[in-house]
Image (spheres, helix red, strand yellow):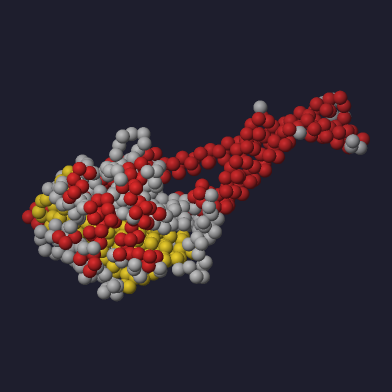
Amino acid sequence: MNTFFQAVSVALYGSGLVVMILLTFHVRSIEYRVDIIGRYWPPGVIIYFLLLLFSGLFIHVLLLLIFRLKEKTIEVEAYERVRSKKESERLPLIQHPNGVQIRDLNLEVTSHCRRCFISHFRIHNNFVIACLLLVLLIVLISLCYYLPILNPTTTHTPLPYQMLAWNNASASIQIVWRNIKQYDSKLMLFNGSGIPTENDIRNSSLWEERTPLLIADHWVLVLEDLNFSIPLFYYIPSYTGTDIIRRIVLPSPDEDVQLLLAGNFGTSPYINSVLLSRISSFQPIVVLLLGNFTSEAFEPKNWELLMRRDGIFDYLADHPFMVSPGLIESVPRWVSSEAPRTIFNGAFPQPQVLRRMRGGSTEGGARNRTDLSSCFSSSSFSLIPSDLAQYYEEDFPSLSDQRYYYSHTISHVFVTVVDSHDNDKRNIAYDLPRGSLLSLEQLTWLNLTLSSPTAQQARYRVLIMSTPLYSTSNILGNEWAEKLLIPLICRYKIDLVLASVSSVYERFHYDDLCQEHGSSHAFHHLSIGSAGKWPVPMTSLFYRRYRWPDLAYRDALPGCETDSCKAHVYGRVGYHYITLTATTERLIVQTHDIVNDEVVDAFTINSRQ
């Protein structure tokens, strides 16, 4: 039985050694300090330490197994060594005070060897048990730390947060908060002069009560006709805590602004808190959240951890943001009939989207496929390339009632958000990757929006989507989405395209791409990388491709010579966020490392005016 357990130990430690070798090979270039232990040592050092530990344990257990199999041989050899000694050396053994006879010497030696081996084996067992208990403890702590459903920590109630409302021309902000016992179902708006203090909360004459609308377990209140650059103050009465005064500030149309973009968040408490400190130091006027918020979009605990008070939503309580759903929010739960974006629609209700649902406007598309004539005309089919027309012969319903494609003008920047997964039912039916084809309604809306005077007069035009058009990392580019959108991007001279699915940061730039569409325009395409989700450098193992010989890499398109090809790729594994600084002369785009707090990539886009 002991031999069996020894063999099992060899197999276990041997498999662990193989895993450690693979991890060492695939993450050898990562120098990031991430979470708990990683705050003080980079993962590479931890991997090397575990590799040495498993190597030592493997060799130790292997030697014990060999000794166990050769136990009888060792006993006989020990006995022969004793018999071969000189008479003077053997005499003390033969003339033992207790009368030990020569014939009993074999049994004594055998018993002695067995006792030594069993003693050593017990020490080994205790050591192995201690190691296993330590590993189990670390695994348990990690599970409780990373998996929200097991996290015993009581999460604070998410704070109210601000979102840019549907019509930027009316200078609107919407306030969203959870429908829970802690908060009242009303909002108090300051109508006095100056900056209110906590003592002013007691003076009811200084506050105007506003009644919100209940949408999917969230209270939503839209404040319209706000004055640009003039702060507005409010608070939501709390039954269980201190009332906190919040402020609203909208950027002036002619003001230089700073925007911040991040996506692929996950629920890592450490990265979330570090990202909050980075955002707070940068002080962007608007934050753009590009989807893939949690690892499981149907678990409320995930969203509570994401929106806790020491995370990024602490900043969004005083600053507006825009949001775009990602792939994770758009995939239905296979074990139930729950529709995609169930929690997402409640947490981020878009008034622009809600207005479409109520039939107040047909500019952005209809609610269902029964009133298509109000959304587009026969000329809309001209937006579809001929080789993709076969996929639009049938009608498919949208992914959900709420469709998250909309636009905003933020000072000099015209931002257009595309819902890449709105038509995923069509993609699934034709066995295409999710995010490949957009609905005809959305294509029509996008064409009208980009051709509008508001978009054409903007100094900079930014397009946000989930599916990357180009990528050489763990998520490949989508050729179907490229065929649909590149003609519009080139025709309306989009300066910057940002995609959120890939958890590896990557910038693509090709000077002559638009020439085949009759335009000399050039644009930058960015996969924004990860802002909390593990950057998956090991993905190359599953894709049978090794794309990260170094932490950062530069490359050209396949089939192009590096010196002559004008298509360039810059990629980097890690945790990133992107900042946009828009002035009247240029748009400065910078990619920041969240943990190391350094700029890892930067470029500028000149104003077209």
Is residue 591 visible to us here?
yes
Q: Please give the name of the residue rendered at 51% of the width and 53% of the height, measured from the top-left corner.
A: 43
In the visual, does 143 lie left or right of 276? Answer: right
Does residue 62 sit above or below 365 in this rendering?
A: above
Q: Nearer the viewer, residue 269 or 167?
A: 167
- Quadrant occupied by the N terminus: top right
Q: Nearer the viewer, residue 54 or 116?
A: 54
Give the x, y percent position of residue 245: 19, 55
In the picture as drawn, the residue positioned furthest to the right comes out as 87
Give the x, y percent position of residue 253: 20, 68
In the picture as drawn, the residue positioned furthest to the left comes out as 205
* Quarter holding residue 252: bottom left
Q: Nearer the viewer, residue 591 or 121?
A: 591
In the visual, does 331 lie left or right of 569? Answer: left
Is residue 236 visible to us here?
no
Give the x, y percent position of residue 574: 45, 57
- Quadrant occupied by the C terminus: bottom left
Q: Please give the name of the residue rendered at 18% of the width and 45% of the height, measured from the top-left corner.
A: 371
* Quarter holding residue 90: top right
Q: Please give the name of the residue rendered at 63% of the width and 34% of the height, measured from the top-left corner.
A: 8
* Quarter holding residue 395: top left
Q: Please give the name of the residue rendered at 31% of the width and 34% of the height, measured from the top-left corner.
A: 337
